[in-house]
Image (cartoon, rainbow, N blue to C red):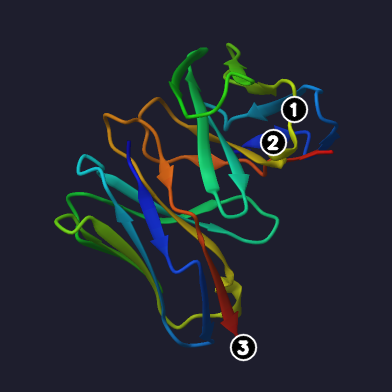
Amino acid sequence: KAGVTQTPRYLIKTRGQQVTLSCSPISGHRSVSWYQQTPGQGLQFLFEYFSETQRNKGNFPGRFSGRQFSNSRSEMNVSTLELGDSALYLCASSLALGSYEQYFGPGTRLTVT
Amino acid sequence: GENVEQHPSTLSVQEGDSAVIKCTYSDSASNYFPWYKQELGKRPQLIIDIRSNVGEKKDQRIAVTLNKTAKHFSLHITETQPEDSAVYFCAARSDTGNQFYFGTGTSLTVIP
């Protein structure tokens, strides 16, 4: 069974631009969560999607948004990029909302210059 | 919300020695505690987990203990090997919170 995939793997953007990241969960998994990973901060929860609806949201500004499609693939968008948005963005898939086990994708490394 | 603290932030051990990483949490409703290993440049991978109705769980050289009264849980790695070198993250989750809260990670280096 294929694992969680994320595209692109690396991205360089300039301040003020916007970016869209994509995540394809494990086949059969319907819940997708997004995390921001930065040195010293660990993994910070962004949001979780299930059945095309955002179910939970972390403490991030409205510039961070996401969506989920009917095939469970998810995208996250960051608008008006700031230098502090440079991070590794990880998505994780779970079988269903409330499932304990989650499996991470390889991440997208975003650099904002 | 939940607050998970993890210590130490860095840990160096000699090959063959044991390593212990500790996490504390604040929400008594948390009932699931996974540990992830993240090697350099790779994705976090679940290595072991424990639920609130269990005090200890072992998987070969890895064990996790949970003390619900004190609200802390620990990862124990015995007979460490160089391939154990990685960043380890603990996390906590409750059914009501429906969100994982992560510790800030421990960078483990096993010296051959």
Q: Chain of mark 2?
A: A
Q: Nearer the viewer, mark 2 or mark 3?
A: 2
Q: Quadrant of the N terminus of chain B?
A: top left
B85 to the left or right of B49: right
| Mark 1 vs mark 2, CA separation in Å | 7 Å
Could you confirm whether marks 2 and 3 are on the same chain?
no
Residue A80 is situated, as x and y percent measured from the top left of the image, at: 74, 22
The crowd level at tag 3 (other Cα within 10 Å; few <14, some 14-19, many 20+) is few
Q: Which residue is mark 3?
A: B112
Q: Which mark is residue A104?
A: none
Q: Residue at x 70, y 56 (%)?
A: B41
Q: Label 2 near label 1: C-beta < 8 Å?
A: yes
Residue at (69, 24) in percent of width and height? A78
Residue drawn at x 69%, y 36% is: A85
**Residue A50 in picture, x, y percent from top left:** 47, 19
Residue at mark 1 shares a chain with residue at mark 3 = no
* Residue contact at pointers 1 and 3, CB within 8 angstroms: no
Amino acid of disc 1:
Leu
Name the residue carrying label 1.
Answer: A81
Secondary structure under tag 3 reads: loop
| Classed neighbour count for the residue bearing mark 1: other residues with Cα under 10 Å, few (<14), some (14–19), many (≥20) | many
**Which residue was labeled with disc 2?**
A85
